Image (tube, grey):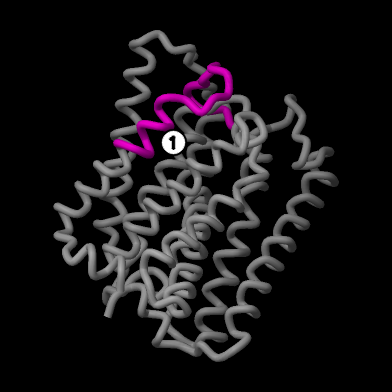
């Protein structure tokens, strides 16, 4: 049947999508309001302007919590408004394929690790930053809570919106481009964009297209969820900088100035296509032209 067509199993009557999207964004606002109140009255600061002396683990955890509101709301909407199985938002398979998740997780994690080692050996301004007092809590947050954030994004953009656009436009490539465009626009307020410039939106849109192609060709978001999870875990736990969205006490800190650098370009133009090729060979993707155009 195909992942994009799982939408046909549920209630698609007028207003259901509008209602679900409104509820998802309301849940985000409620989640953000809750954690902002906790930060102000328990920690003494706003999450919009986190002081340098703040407990970064506490702030990081609070920033992640609103995504759990999105995650839960979206699943409830699929089950009770659209009246179809929660699984249909993850995959067209009979069960969630954890092997796919783990394969993508390890593959992209290995590639990022190799790049990090290469940068250190080439003398890039990367310093050891590990703090035993903060590392264990950060590790737990990264493993237990951060994947909820990445899963919520994959469910909404590569699951819900992708299937929605497939329902209305009947074309895989249109669904991929539209969901990727919205994914990019939703990142416009990130500190990275403010530091580097709007050119960084190209990276987010490109990543959205990459993940959309994976979801469409593989008939599920397991690979995308694994890729997205390790990408953000790596940025939070292994290598950070002082200008990205999530500020943490990672093992290494990159002191390079903000830039749309060579590694970003290589990631979009070379590494992402290579990963698509690997996935294609491993999972025997076929009928590319038919799936993308029809």
Instruction: Give the vertical position of 287 relative to 137 (above or below).
Output: below
Q: How far from the left and from the top, in percent, is residue 292?
A: 30, 66
In the image, taking residue 101 as reference, residue 31 lies left or right, namely right
Residue closer to the observer: 44 or 240: 240
Q: Is residue 114 magenta?
A: no
Q: Closer to the camera, 126 or 272?
A: 272
Q: Does residue 266 show up magenta in the picture?
A: yes
| Secondary structure of residue under mark 1 | helix
Going by the image, does 151 lie left or right of 221?
right
Image height check: is 241 above or below 34?
Answer: above
Q: Nearer the viewer, residue 75 or 282?
A: 282
Residue at image x 59%, y 89%?
Answer: 14
| Quarter of the view holding residue 23 | bottom right
Which residue is at 58% across, 79% downward? 17
Numbered range of the magenta stretch? 248-270
Taking the image as shown, residue 179 lies to the left or right of residue 190, namely: left
Q: Quadrant of residue 116?
A: top left
**Looking at the picture, how far across and down is residue 236, in whole percent?**
51, 35
């Amino acid at each position: 049947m195909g992942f994009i067509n799982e939408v046909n199993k549920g209630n698609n009557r007028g207003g259901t999508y509008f209602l679900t999207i409104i509820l998802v964004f309301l849940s985000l606002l409620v989640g953000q309001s809750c954690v902002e109140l906790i930060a102000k009255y328990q920690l003494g600061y706003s999450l919009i302007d986190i002081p340098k002396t703040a407990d970064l683990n506490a702030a990081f955890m609070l920033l992640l919590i609103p995504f759990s509101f999105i995650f839960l709301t979206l699943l409830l909407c699929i089950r009770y408004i659209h009246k179809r199985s929660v699984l249909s938002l993850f995959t067209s398979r009979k069960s969630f394929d954890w092997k796919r998740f783990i394969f993508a997780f390890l593959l992209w994690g290995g590639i990022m690790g190799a790049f990090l080692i290469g940068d250190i050996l080439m003398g890039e301004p990367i310093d050891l930053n590990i703090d035993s007092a903060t590392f264990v809590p950060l590790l737990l947050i990264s493993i237990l809570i951060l994947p909820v954030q990445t899963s919520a994004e994959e469910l909404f953009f590569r699951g819900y919106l992708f299937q929605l656009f497939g329902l209305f436009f009947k074309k895989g490539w249109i669904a991929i481009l539209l969901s990727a465009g919205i994914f990019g626009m939703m990142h416009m307020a990130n500190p990275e964009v403010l530091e580097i410039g709007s050119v960084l939106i190209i990276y987010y849109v490109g990543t959205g297209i990459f993940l959309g192609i994976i979801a469409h060709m593989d008939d599920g978001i397991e690979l995308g969820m694994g890729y997205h999870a390790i990408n953000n875990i790596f940025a939070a736990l292994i290598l950070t900088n002082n200008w990205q969205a999530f500020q943490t006490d990672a093992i290494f800190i990159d002191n390079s100035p903000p830039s749309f650098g060579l590694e970003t370009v290589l990631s979009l133009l070379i590494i992402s296509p290579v990963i698509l090729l690997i996935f294609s060979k491993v999972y025997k993707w076929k009928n590319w032209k038919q799936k993308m155009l029809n």
